[in-house]
């Protein structure tokens, strides 16, 4: 009689999967993709995924028995295994790394997991079994328990199934970062009932109210407020304007003269046509749509290059409808969580319940819920909208993948492994399901546009904005010249102030863009020139005024703002450079009567941080929004007429081969936020170098010229998309160790790849969290086999880590690191 074995993927970086012994009965029940809890090492217990069932005993080691089967049915599909396999090969990491990235935390319990009581739900203790009750009771007295403590309480070796049962009953929660449980604040608005909109009806109403003068005043006030501005009228504004109380407003609501409504995160819908059924496409969109469908006949991937505000989303909606009619799922990828909040409400208008959202600000239990819905192909998860991690969900039958803003850097994961690029992974995922991918962007990445030129991708272009709205008028302001003539107020040129004043007086909104958060990046002593540095990174500390502290943007170190210089004791400290906080402060001094808000990493920390700011801006409660690049990502604000870029130079002069391409994309995207309705928008870009090629190309919106120019550089200097790149980073606390190790590594690489190895070189910030970094770049020409190149690098990597001195050095392999 044969023994049965299973190969298990463990969520730790092991080169191979491990084999465990199972009984015949278990072998009939277990299927690949189920979770099992298994012993590993001397005392650890992990949750692993069954990869295969077979009868080959491992030769090297004695196979251990599994502890327990955790699932009734597989939670990972065959298609996912194929994608994981590709990711681990392509991005040079282990399948365990990919599994850890793919599965929500609550799925992978191990002996280190920390568990606490679920505070949000009251549990009926009668529903719990004896052992569950013991744990639940213990959590009343202790805030958290480790799995080890639980097994001591119930005196059992393996308690993962018990923890799993408690998780399913929502009695406990797995401990992760705790996000602010933000309860959205509802604002109460009122409007006149529709019946009173005509002149006669209003006249009659006012006569009826002649005996209730106070109520009549409220109606009159509401009428005049509505006439003045198109904004929705909050109850609080109405009561102050008419000197009445909320009781009077309430009695008017009870009489059904006024109608109240609340706004949370939804758009205030000005016209009611938007609710159901997708919009009709205009001519240009219609042509684009036909072109896309035609290209899909011959190509699997199509690039849609449409200028900002050309109505790409409407085309996506039509394509999603097509896929849904065939009963297939759709994946809609977005680069940034901020964008999902705006799009969710738009897509829910069209597809209602069928939209599911998946990203990292969701708690572990919420993610498990979405995972299970996608796996069971539930009607609630037909359209999955998410950030890069949603590529790893267990799709059932994909019919289409849309990658919106495909040029975005946020699609690439830098740490931890797998260091994958969601756009490239999505393309592979589509080929696993034999389906199509649509890449959309107003400023495509050079690789995608290059692939389209090489006929690898189909290319469809949309050159006019929706409703023939004009492209914004882009003007470059030379601040070097303005400073000479003393025409600057702080960081604002006279031109910018003039345009801002005019825009605000017309009742429009303004966006100001500055790609640095904090108040000022450098604090310098005027006497001796010393500036405070981070103790564990090679970088100066940024001053954050609202907390009065100095922060490091690399490791998070912070200290109280110093009062005098640490080197010479002088009190004359000066700030150099400026960030969003300083812009915000200057704006509120220049325009004291208008409301200013700021959107950067500091103001969007909580789960709903983005929504709060976006909603207040959409409801026009804020006049000027200051922010970092979060603002550039495809957000759609109807009332913005002016966009100001405070300083375009710090992006252009960045030491990176993509700096020019990125600046072009960023500036064009930020300009695209202006004038999205019938009035033409205006963009002012302040720069010290207005004659810079990239800025000239931005001002004429000339993507093709930028593409040609940048491609010449890429050919000359052998950079992607002409060559592939693999970046190898070595990290260690000891400076000399990193140096010696990097030299050895680079030398070994040079023996194989000759002149295609660059470095080793220290990056601009070479010490982060007390670890020194050193980079080596390997360039891979087009003709060279990728697989063989990677095999050679892995071979060198293995011999590197077998040298005793080099073992403590951490080596990071990053494929396509840009």
Image (cartoon, helix red, strand yellow):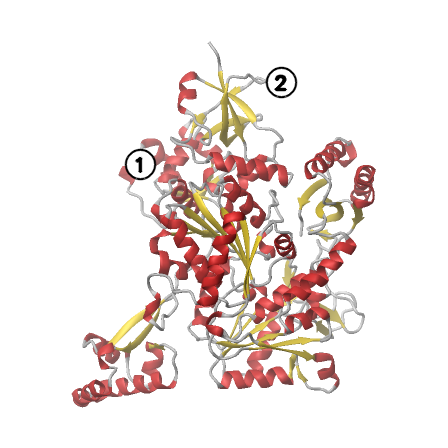
> Which is more foreground, mark 2 or mark 1?
2
Q: Are marks 2 and 1 in contact (CB under 8 Å)?
A: no
Percent from the top left, x then y, of residue 369?
Answer: 39, 45
Percent from the top left, x then y, of residue 534?
Answer: 70, 58
- Residue hosting label 1: 128
Number of other residues with Cα within 10 Å of mark 1, as a class: few under 14, some 14 to 19, many 20 or more: some
- Secondary structure category for the residue under label 1: loop
Percent from the top left, x then y, of residue 30?
Answer: 42, 25
- Residue hosting label 2: 60
Q: Is residue 698 above or below residue 142?
A: below
Who's the residue at 46% across and 35% down the image? 77
Can residue 59 be spotted in the picture? yes
Q: Is residue 676 above or below residue 265?
A: below
- Secondary structure category for the residue under label 2: loop
The foreground one among 655 and 109 is 655
Say whether disc 2 or disc 1 marks the residue closer to the N-terminus.
2
In screen coordinates, is 696 left or right of 144?
A: right
């Amino acid at each position: 009689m044969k023994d049965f074995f299973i190969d298990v993927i463990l969520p730790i970086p092991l080169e191979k999967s491990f084999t465990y012994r199972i009984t015949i009965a278990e072998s009939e029940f277990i299927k690949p993709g189920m979770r099992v809890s298994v012993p590993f090492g001397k005392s650890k217990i992990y949750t692993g995924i069954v990869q295969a069932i077979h009868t080959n005993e491992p030769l090297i080691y004695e196979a251990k028995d599994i502890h327990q089967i955790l699932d009734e049915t597989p939670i990972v599909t065959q298609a996912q295994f194929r994608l994981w396999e590709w990711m681990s090969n392509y991005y040079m990491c282990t399948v365990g790394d990919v599994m850890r990235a793919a599965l929500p935390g609550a799925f992978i319990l191990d002996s280190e997991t920390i568990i606490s009581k679920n505070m949000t739900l009251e549990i009926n203790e009668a529903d719990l079994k004896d052992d569950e009750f013991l744990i639940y009771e213990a959590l009343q007295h202790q805030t958290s328990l480790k799995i080890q403590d639980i097994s001591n309480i119930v005196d059992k070796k393996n308690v993962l199934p018990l923890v799993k049962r408690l998780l399913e009953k929502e009695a406990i929660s797995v401990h992760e970062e705790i996000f602010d449980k933000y309860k959205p604040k509802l604002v109460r608005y009122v409007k006149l009932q529709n019946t009173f909109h005509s002149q006669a009806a209003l006249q009659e109403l006012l006569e009826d109210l002649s005996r209730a003068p106070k109520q009549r005043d409220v109606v009159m006030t509401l009428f005049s407020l509505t006439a003045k501005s198109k904004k929705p009228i909050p109850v609080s504004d109405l009561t102050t304007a008419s000197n009445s109380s909320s009781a009077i407003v309430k009695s008017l609501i009870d009489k059904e003269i006024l109608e109240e409504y609340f706004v949370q995160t939804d758009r205030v819908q000005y016209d009611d046509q938007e609710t159901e059924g997708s919009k009709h496409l205009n001519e240009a969109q219609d042509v684009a749509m036909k072109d896309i469908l035609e290209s899909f006949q011959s190509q699997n991937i199509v690039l849609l290059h449409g200028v900002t505000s050309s109505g790409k989303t409407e085309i996506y909606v039509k394509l999603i409808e097509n896929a849904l009619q065939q009963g297939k799922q759709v994946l809609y990828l977005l680069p940034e969580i901020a964008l999902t909040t705006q799009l969710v409400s738009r897509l829910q208008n069209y597809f209602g319940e069928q939209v599911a959202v998946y990203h990292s600000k969701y708690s572990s239990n919420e993610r498990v819920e979405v995972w299970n819905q996608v796996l069971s192909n539930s009607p609630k998860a037909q359209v999955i909208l998410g950030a890069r991690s949603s590529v790893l969900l267990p799709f059932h039958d994909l019919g289409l993948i849309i990658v919106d803003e495909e040029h975005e850097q946020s699609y690439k994961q830098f740490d931890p492994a797998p260091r994958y690029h969601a756009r490239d992974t999505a393309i592979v995922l589509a080929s696993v399901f034999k389906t199509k991918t649509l890449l959309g962007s107003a400023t495509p990445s050079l690789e995608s546009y290059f692939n389209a030129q090489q006929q690898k991708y189909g290319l469809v272009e949309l050159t006019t904005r929706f409703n023939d709205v004009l492209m914004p008028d882009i003007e470059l302001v030379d601040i070097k010249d303005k400073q000479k003539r003393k025409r600057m107020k702080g960081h604002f040129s006279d031109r910018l102030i003039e345009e801002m004043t005019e825009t605000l007086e017309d009742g429009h909104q303004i966006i100001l863009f500055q790609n640095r958060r904090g108040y000022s990046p450098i604090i310098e002593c005027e006497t001796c020139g010393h500036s405070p540095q981070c103790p564990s990174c090679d970088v100066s500390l940024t001053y954050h005024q609202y907390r009065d502290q100095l922060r490091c943007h690399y490791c998070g170190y912070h200290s109280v703002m110093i009062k005098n210089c640490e080197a010479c004791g002088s009190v004359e400290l000066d700030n150099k450079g400026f960030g969003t906080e300083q812009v915000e402060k200057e704006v509120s001094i220049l325009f004291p009567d208008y409301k200013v808000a700021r959107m950067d990493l500091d103001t969007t920390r909580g789960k709903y941080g983005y929504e709060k700011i976006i909603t207040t801006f959409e409801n026009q409660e804020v006049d000027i929004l200051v922010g970092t690049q979060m603002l550039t990502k495809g957000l759609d604000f109807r009332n913005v007429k002016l966009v100001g870029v405070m300083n375009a130079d710090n992006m252009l002069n960045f030491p990176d081969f993509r700096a020019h391409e990125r600046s072009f994309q960023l500036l064009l995207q930020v300009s695209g936020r202006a004038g999205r309705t019938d009035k033409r928008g205006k963009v002012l870009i302040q720069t010290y170098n207005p004659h810079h090629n990239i800025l000239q190309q931005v001002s004429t919106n000339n993507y093709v010229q930028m593409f040609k120019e940048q491609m010449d550089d890429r050919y000359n200097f052998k950079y992607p998309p002409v060559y592939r790149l693999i970046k190898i980073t070595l990290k260690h606390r000891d400076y000399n160790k990193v140096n010696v190790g990097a030299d050895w590594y680079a030398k070994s690489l040079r023996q194989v790849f000759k002149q295609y190895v660059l470095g080793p070189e220290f990056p601009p910030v070479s010490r982060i969290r007390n670890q020194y970094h050193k980079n080596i770049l390997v360039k891979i020409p087009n003709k060279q086999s990728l697989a063989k190149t990677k095999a050679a690098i892995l071979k060198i990597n293995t011999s590197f880590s077998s040298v005793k001195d080099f073992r403590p050095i951490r080596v990071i392999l990053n494929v396509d690191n840009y």
